[in-house]
Structures are given as structure tokens and as C-alpha cells.
Image: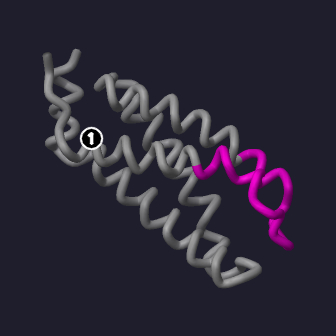
Amino acid sequence: MRSRPLPVTVAAVLMALLGLANIASPVFPDPEGVPEFVIYSGVVLGVVGLIAVAGLWMLRKWSIWLTIVVSVLNLLSAAPGIPFGPNTALQVAAAVTVVVSALIIVLVVIPTSRHAFVAAT
């Protein structure tokens, strides 16, 4: 049995939290100024993110690329909310999403993580 490096475990947990937050976004009150398609596209991104989490957890090579793509899309979709968010709470949430998405990308591309996926094949 292969062991999962700590950076991969942390990336999977952070990715799961972002995915669940994206899926739950329609439940929260609809903030003024945020288009509805952005909210519902976040649900799709959350579901795909949870698929990436499963791949990370099982050390599947494809999950590295899926994680990077989902994290970049999360980052790009949240970035405009930092300066243009309708209220301070959403601006802070957008900033946290950007930082966490960037951290996930770093965690899956560091050599320790990449070696675990190479050894898994």
C-alpha cells in the first residue's frame, strides 16, 4: 500500500472544502450584483472538484491535472470578487478562495506530491 504524502492530503481536504462551499452556494442568500449563472456554474465546479478530490485521495495521476484546472477556475472566478464584491464579507470570501486555490495548486505540484503520483502508476 502506498502512502499519501501530507501535501496531497492537505490539498485534498482543502479542495473538498472548496467543492462543498461551491455546491452549497445556491443555498445562501443571493447577493446583489452576482449573476445567477456564476452561482450555478460554481455548483458544477464544486462537483468536478469533488471528483478531483477522490482522484487525489486514491493517488490517480489524472487528478493532478483536474485539480489544477478546477483550482485555476476557482481562482479566476473568485478574483473579481476581491475588488468588486458587493460587501466586505464577500470580498473576504473571494480573497480566501483565491489564496486557498493557489495553495492547492502549489501543494499538488511540489516534488513530494508529484513523486507520489509517479510511484502510483
Q: Nearer the viewer, residue 93 or 83?
A: 93
Q: Tell me if 39 is positioned left or right of 92 in this view.
A: right
Q: Which residue is at 37% across, 35% downward?
A: 64
Alpha-carbon neighbours of circle 1 within 10 Å: few (<14), some, or many (≥20)? many
Boundaries of the magenta span: 21-41
Q: Is residue 33 magenta?
A: yes
**Residue 104 coordinates in the image, percent (x, y):** 37, 52
Q: Is residue 113 above or below residue 61?
A: below
Q: Which residue is at 60% across, 42% downward?
A: 46
User: From the image, which quarter does the C terminus lie in?
Assistant: top left
Q: Which residue is at 44% across, 43% downward?
A: 68
**Residue 3 coordinates in the image, percent (x, y):** 14, 28
Q: Tell me if 20 is positioned left or right of 111 in this view.
A: right
Which amino acid, mark 1? Answer: Val
Q: Is residue 84 above or below residue 69?
A: below
Q: Tell me if 17 is positioned left or right of 55 in this view.
A: right
Q: How many tags in the picture?
A: 1
User: From the image, which quarter does the N terminus lie in?
Assistant: top left
**Quarter holding residue 87:** bottom right
Report the residue marked by disc 1.
8
Q: Is residue 77 above or below residue 114?
A: below
Q: Which residue is at 80% across, 63% downward?
A: 29
Question: At numbered mark 1, what does the secondary structure look like: helix, strand or loop?
Answer: helix
**Residue 111 coordinates in the image, percent (x, y):** 16, 44
